[in-house]
Amino acid sequence: MIEYTMSCKKIDWLQVHEILDEAGLSHFSPEDQEKIFTNSDVVSFAIEGKTVVGVSRALSDGLSQAAIYNVAVRPEYQHRGVALGMVGRLLNALKGQNVILYTNPSNVSFYEKFEFRRCKTAMCYFVGENDHLQLLEDHGFMLPEGYRFVDEYPKKKISDAR
Ligand SMILES: CC(C)(COP(=O)(O)OP(=O)(O)OC[C@H]1O[C@@H](n2cnc3c(N)ncnc32)[C@H](O)[C@@H]1OP(=O)(O)O)[C@@H](O)C(=O)NCCC(=O)NCCS
């Protein structure tokens, strides 16, 4: 039976590392993942026996603003409502706060289930070499450098033509 916990006690950080590494979301060592999750304000794990099957976490000021990160479920446990269970618990703990996140385009409909909306002016500053930033572009996380709003381009073209 899959159970959920919002505590970092008894979590096997090697498994957390493996899940996030395999999902391509984060490649920190098990020791660093322990720091990252224990320093987060809210965490939600899905566990079956000794197996960590899903991980998620959020940063929050405790009152008004929060951000969700590192939501991932082992491939063999996907499509069983595990992420819904974890994210539902995170959002419950963050009730009353604005919550932001960024995600792979393929997951947009997952977050729409919780009434998240695409944000036109969200901006990010990512640490990393050019190839890492290119990877983020290639996967559709980040728009190309200099890109602003899609609706600006047709207008520009019209005025250029005059
Ligand atoms: C995205 C992810 C966490 C979803 O986990 P999950 O436990 O399979 O999701 P759930 O079963 O709770 O999803 C419930 C519903 O959300 C919807 N959904 C939308 N996008 C989805 C997606 N990419 N994956 C799974 N479900 C998705 C589906 O309707 C799904 O129901 P279904 O399985 O009957 O089709 C999982 O696919 C994953 O770990 N992906 C790799 C890491 C990642 O991209 N994480 C998000 C970064 S923020």
Image (tube, grey):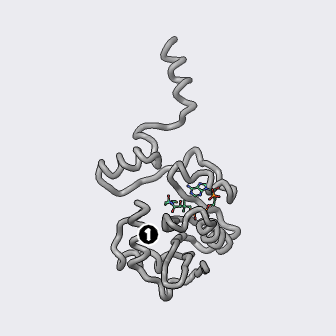
At label 1, the amino acid type is Ile
Q: Residue at x 60, y 69 (%)?
A: 82
Label 1: which residue? 19
Q: Is residue 51 above or below residue 148?
A: below
**Ligand 1 shows up in which quadrant of the image?**
bottom right
Q: Position of residue 42 (x, y in %)?
A: 56, 76
User: Residue at position x 36%, y 49% from top?
Assistant: 133
Could you say where residue 114 lies in the image, as x and y percent from the top left?
68, 59
Using the image, determine if residue 8 lies above or below residue 155. below
- Front residue of 70/24: it is 24
Relative to 35, is 27 above or below? above
Q: Residue at x 50, y 52 (%)?
A: 104
The reply to whether residue 44 is visible in this rendering is yes
For the view shown, which residue lies furthest in the top direction? 162
Task: Kindly identify the residue that appears in the image at 40 percent across and 75 percent down.
Answer: 33
Q: Badge 1 local density, few (<14 within 10 Å), some, or many (20+)?
A: many
Asked whether mark 1 and ligand 1 are closer than 8 Å, the reply comes as: yes
Compared with residue 134, is residue 152 higher up or lower down, i.e. above or below?
Answer: above
Q: Quadrant location of the N terminus?
A: bottom right
Residue 140, position in %: x, y?
46, 45
* Closer to the camera in the image, 90 or 73: 73
Secondary structure under tag 1 reads helix
From the top left corner, tell me how far across and down residue 66 is, in percent.
58, 66
